[in-house]
Image (cartoon, rainbow, N blue to C red):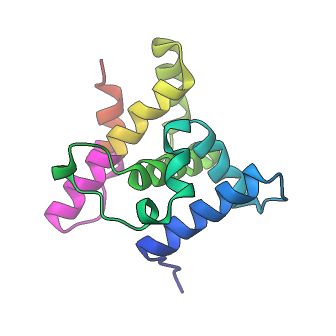
Amino acid sequence: MLFQPSRDDVRRFLAESYRRWRAGLPLEPMQAVATEVIALHPEYFALFDDETQLFRDYTPEDGGVNPFLHLTLHLAVAEQLAIDQPPGIKALYAARVQKRGDPHEALHDLVEALGMTLFEAQRAGRMPDNDSYLERIRRLP
């Protein structure tokens, strides 16, 4: 059976990971990965302290990035890099780090490419295409 958490489940997981990390409490392995991603984004810390922000809708019409979508895309990329799946993603990331000179900016390149790949797949009603995802990363300036 595939675990499919709801939007609120994911946000609760991120908030609890953040809370435990800030309190210096032990973290489960996935919480540790989540807090590494959260630590890269101090601009989001206040969201985890304000429950009205935690569960509100973030839409493109708001004019900003959905912080929870951004963090979960980061988590997906972290998982991809950990297992080099799709094959070659680690090498492409290393090349982006070399080109950008900043690992976080290189991660954002992959996050953006993944987001576009998922958006296209959802719009077309199909599974994401790994080949087009990797090609999208290769074509980045």
Q: Residue at x 34, y 27 (%)?
A: 138
Quadrant location of residue 19?
A: bottom right
Depicted 95 relative to depicted 77: above or below:
above
Q: Is residue 74 left or right of residue 125?
A: right
* Camera-side residue of 56 and 132: 56
The N terminus is located in which quarter? bottom right
Q: Which residues are magenta?
A: 115-132
| 36 in the magenta segment | no
Q: Where is residue 141 drawn, in percent x and y?
A: 30, 17
Vertical order, 106 against 141 (above or below): below
Q: Is residue 129 left or right of residue 125?
A: right
Choose between 42 and 110: the one closer to the eye. 42
Residue 118 coordinates in the image, percent (x, y): 29, 55
Q: Main secondary structure of the magenta part?
A: helix
Q: Residue, x 51% and y 81% (percent of image)?
A: 2
Residue 44 showing in the rendered view: yes
Q: Residue at x 28, y 49 (%)?
A: 117
- In the rendered view, tell whether residue 96 sits above or below residue 51: above
Which of 87 and 75 lies nearest the eye of the viewer?
75
Indicate the quadrant where residue 81 lies: top right
Return the x and y of residue 113 as percentages of the image width and height: 33, 39
Compared across the picture, whether 40 is left or right of 140 comes to: right
| Residue 41 shows up from this direction | no
Please tell me how many numbered marks the rendered image carries. Answer: 0
Left of 141 or right of it: where is 111? right
Is 87 in front, or is 104? 104
Name the outermost residue toward the bottom: 1
Residue located 63% across and 40% down the image: 39
Task: Give percent across and percent down for residue 110.
Answer: 42, 36
